Image (cartoon, helix red, strand yellow):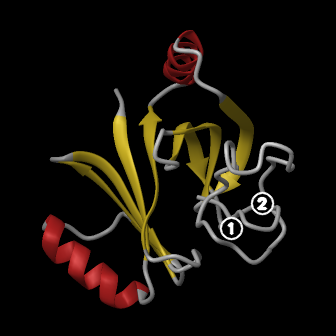
Amino acid sequence: MKRLHIHVGVEDIAHSVTFYSALFGAPPVKVKDDYAKWMLDDPHVNFAISSRSGKRGVDHLGIQVDSAEELNALRAQLSAANLTTHSEGETTCCYARSEKSWVEDPAGMAWEAYHTMEDAQIFSSKAAAPVESACCAPQLAAAPDKDKSCGTSGSGCC
C-alpha cells in the first residue's frame, strides 16, 4: 500500500510537535531533537518535520511503499512515463534505512519514491554539510552537471 509523504522544515521542533499532535489528534511515532514523524492512517500519510533544512515549509514530498516489489513497480511506472529519475539506492536518512529514487515535478518540487527497511540511530549516513533541503533530494533539473549524490553541499537527508 502506498502512503503519501510530506516533509516540512520547521524552526522549533518542540513547538511544532505540540501543534501537529493537536492537529492530527495523535502523538508522533518518532521524536528526536531535530526531527519528528507521524504515521497516520486517516489521512494515510507519513508526515515528518525537521529543523535540518535551511527553508521553512514544505521541503519535499514522496510516496512511501511497503515493499521492494512495490518500489520497483513505482520506478517502472515513472520510467514508462519517460520521467528522469535518480536512484539513490540504500541510504540512511531521517533515522531510517531506506531504498530511494527521486524525481522532480514540473514546478521543481522534489518527490521521493522509497521503501523503509528499518529504523536507524543516526539521521544520515552522509557527511554533515550545510543544507538547503532536509533530505537527499538531488538537484535533477537545476544542476544537471553537478554530482547528484547525497551529502553534497546543498543536500541533506530525509
In percent of width and height, residue 114 lies at 55, 37
Residue placed farthest to the top in the image?
80
Q: Quadrant of residue 104?
A: top right
Q: Quadrant of residue 48?
A: bottom left
Question: In which quadrant is the C terminus drawn?
Answer: bottom right
Mark 1 lies on residue: 122
Q: Give the SS element for disc 2.
A: loop
Dot 1, crowdedness within 10 Å: few (<14), some or many (≥20)?
A: few
In percent of width and height, residue 102 lies at 61, 38
In percent of width and height, residue 67 lies at 51, 25
In the shown orientation, is residue 105 left or right of residue 22? right
Question: In which quadrant is the N terminus drawn?
Answer: top left
Whether the residues at callouts 2 and 1 have beta carbons within 8 Å, the answer is: yes
Q: Is residue 16 above or below residue 28?
A: below
In the shown orientation, is residue 93 left or right of residue 26? right
* Residue type, numbered disc 1: Ile
Which residue is at 31% across, 80% downward? 17
In the shown orientation, is residue 91 left or right of residue 31? right
Q: Is residue 158 above or below residue 79?
A: below
Q: Is residue 70 above or below residue 127?
A: above
* Residue type, numbered disc 2: Ser
For the residues labelled 2 and 1, the Cα–Cα distance comes to 7 Å
Q: Give the SS element for disc 1.
A: loop
Which residue is at 73% across, 66% downward? 154
Q: Nearer the viewer, residue 138 or 40?
A: 138
Q: Nearer the viewer, residue 154 or 119?
A: 154
Which residue is at 32% across, 68% downward? 28
In percent of width and height, residue 113 lies at 53, 35
Mark 2 lies on residue: 125
Between disc 2 and disc 1, the foreground one is 2
Q: Is residue 147 above or below residue 88?
A: below
